[in-house]
């Protein structure tokens, strides 16, 4: 599931009610775990952060950046613990034991677990149902290396002769969930714990060198030493220290991610999407432990100093940032950290403040070499696996013409076709019995050559970019009549332009004072209605 990099579009803290709801869901999903186990994974006095991704995956992390659980479809029915959570509570899930260390190389390479790679206990295959969450362990180590869901029941597996796929892997050690979500402090914990690795006994009784087979860190050393050590660091921070960190993070955000064109910004959005991502690694920033106690009071204090201007939204009862005084002494004297600039930019690019929908949209047609033109690309040393713009592709064919000296001596605007170039341009496109052309005008060469390549398109909004095969699909807008004079407008195809259907529906609801809904069909669509008024 986490083989491809996907950027988080928002981060938010869980409320008390949502926190309780999450724990109820986890207790139902993982009946093997005790209340103490859940308290170890989601400590009662530690904030829980929810990260939402473009592919609908939700990741629940404890304050400080340690992801503990992830929800595949965002509906609460397919929640899994992360590998790090399984290091803390190794028996949270039932687990399959691999036959030997060699099999783990395939698992942590992204492959699903097959039945032939499982070590079957003497008492037989354990009982399980299809779709259950299970973990994977290697011999001689209690710390799981992957988690996934069963593809069939144990009864079906026995009938199949223990052949085929046993576990569909959703997350494994060192995949992109690990690399993309974990904070520097977590990575440091994992790296330092790796020093305790030892050889793993294989099925035959020999050993496999840790360079070839992964051996997980001791979960006890992480939970009792490193993790608690980081938590202790927070508790010893004085009120003055918290105030200093707040001011530094605010200035860092004002310099790097808070742009004048995005103002005004609600205080909660400023906090979750701009200030928090600027905190130093290992620091769990909590405004309640500052001298201001509340976010609104802190922002109002910064407004009193002249650094920013804020107003209270009378309807939402929330302080809103309206402007930044970039000539203020504190702002001018502050030097932003480059490393944090990169991280905060990444956090804000997909924020839930609709800033993504406000960024400039760029759409470009690109092309991939096909079997027709591969010989031309290869001849001039161009990469046939790369995507090219029309002008870049034209440069390739003209480079080939120059290399083979195909320009007609008596007319420099005409290119003489050799067998390779003739096949690239016309093979399969000329009707049988028709004579192949022997030359082509330069003005027609580029477009003809590009037409023989595979069309793709790239859509870019801010720092988010996606490449898709084929021509760009347009947005479809249809109007239907329902229940007498009620008219409904359907909008579909938004994902082609990296538009968030939920965000757009909310904006249209305000813009047209109408009701909106979002439903998942073959593509997203938005329905708008307002009595008999056509929208």
Image: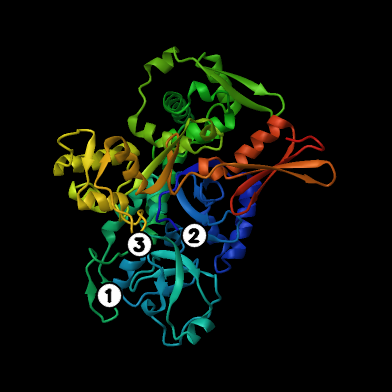
Instruction: Give the structural element (helix, strand or loop) at label 1.
Output: strand
Instruction: Give the structural element (helix, strand or loop) at label 3.
Output: loop
Q: In front here: 18 or 354?
A: 354
Q: What crowding class fits label 2: few (fewer than 14 Cα within 10 Å), some (14-19), or many (20 or more)?
A: many
Q: Which residue is mark 1?
A: 201
Q: Which residue is mark 2?
A: 81
Q: Are marks 3 and 2 in contact (CB under 8 Å)?
A: no
The quadrant in which the C terminus is found is top right
Instruction: Give the structural element (helix, strand or loop) at label 2.
Output: strand
Q: Are marks 3 and 1 in contact (CB under 8 Å)?
A: no
Q: How many marks?
A: 3
Query: Mark 3 and mark 1: span between their CA atoms?
Result: 16 Å
Sequence-first tag of 3 and 2: 2
Q: Is residue 384 in view?
A: no
Sequence-first tag of 1 and 2: 2
Q: Is residue 517 in view?
A: yes
> Residue shown at 29%/80% (left/top)?
203
| Image position of 99 (left or right of 26) | left
- Residue at the outermost right position: 484
Q: In front here: 421 or 527?
A: 421
Q: Are marks 1 and 2 in contact (CB under 8 Å)?
A: no
Query: Mark 1 and mark 2: span between their CA atoms?
Result: 26 Å
The quadrant in which the N terminus is found is bottom left
């Amino acid at each position: 599931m986490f083989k491809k990099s996907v950027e988080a579009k928002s981060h938010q803290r869980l409320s008390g009610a949502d926190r309780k709801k999450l724990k109820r869901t986890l207790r139902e999903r993982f009946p093997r775990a005790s209340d103490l186990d859940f308290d170890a994974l989601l400590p009662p006095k530690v904030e829980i952060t929810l990260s939402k991704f473009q592919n609908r995956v939700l990741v629940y992390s404890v304050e400080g950046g340690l992801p503990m659980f992830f929800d595949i479809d965002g509906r609460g029915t397919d929640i899994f613990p992360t590998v790090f959570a399984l290091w803390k509570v190794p028996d949270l899930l039932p687990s399959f034991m691999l036959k030997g260390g060699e099999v783990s190389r395939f698992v942590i390479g992204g492959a699903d677990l097959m039945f032939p790679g499982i070590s079957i206990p003497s008492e037989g295959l354990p009982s399980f149902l299809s779709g259950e969450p299970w973990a994977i362990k290697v011999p001689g180590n209690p710390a799981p290396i992957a988690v996934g869901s069963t593809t069939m029941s144990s009864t079906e597996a026995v009938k199949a002769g223990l052949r085929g796929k046993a576990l569909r892997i959703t997350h494994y050690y060192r995949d992109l969930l690990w690399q993309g979500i974990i904070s520097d402090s977590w990575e440091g914990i994992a790296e330092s714990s790796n020093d305790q690795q030892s050889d793993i006994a294989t099925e035959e009784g020999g050993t496999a060198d840790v360079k070839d087979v992964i051996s997980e860190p001791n979960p006890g050393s992480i939970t009792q030493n490193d993790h608690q050590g980081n938590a202790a660091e927070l508790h010893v921070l004085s009120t003055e220290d918290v105030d200093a960190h707040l001011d530094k993070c605010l200035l860092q955000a004002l310099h790097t991610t808070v742009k004048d064109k995005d103002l005004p910004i609600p205080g909660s959005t400023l906090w979750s999407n701009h200030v928090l991502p600027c905190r130093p690694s290992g620091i769990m920033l909590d405004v309640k432990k500052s001298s201001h106690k509340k976010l609104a009071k802190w922002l109002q204090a910064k407004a009193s100093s002249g650094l920013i201007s804020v107003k209270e939204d009378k309807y939402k009862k929330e302080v809103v940032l309206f402007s930044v005084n970039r000539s203020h002494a504190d702002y001018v004297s502050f030097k932003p950290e480059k490393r944090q600039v990169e991280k905060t930019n990444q956090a804000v690019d997909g924020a839930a403040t609709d800033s993504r929908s406000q960024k400039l949209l760029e759409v470009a047609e690109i092309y991939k070499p096909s079997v027709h033109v591969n010989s031309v690309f290869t001849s001039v040393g161009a990469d046939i696996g790369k995507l090219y713009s029309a002008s870049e592709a034209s440069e390739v064919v003209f480079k080939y013409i120059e290399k083979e000296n195909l320009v007609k001596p008596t007319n420099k605007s005409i290119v003489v076709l050799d067998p390779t170039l003739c096949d690239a341009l016309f093979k399969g496109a000329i009707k049988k019995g028709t004579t192949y052309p022997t030359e082509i005008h330069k003005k027609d060469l580029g477009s003809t050559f590009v037409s023989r390549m595979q069309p793709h398109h790239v859509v870019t909004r801010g720092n988010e970019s996606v490449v898709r095969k084929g021509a760009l699909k347009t947005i479809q807008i249809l109007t239907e009549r329902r229940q007498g004079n009620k008219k409904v407008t359907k909008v579909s195809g938004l994902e082609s332009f990296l538009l968030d259907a939920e965000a757009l529906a909310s904006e249209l609801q305000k813009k047209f004072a109408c009701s909106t809904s979002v439903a998942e069909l073959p593509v997203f669509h938005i329905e708008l209605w307002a009595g008999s008024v056509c929208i």
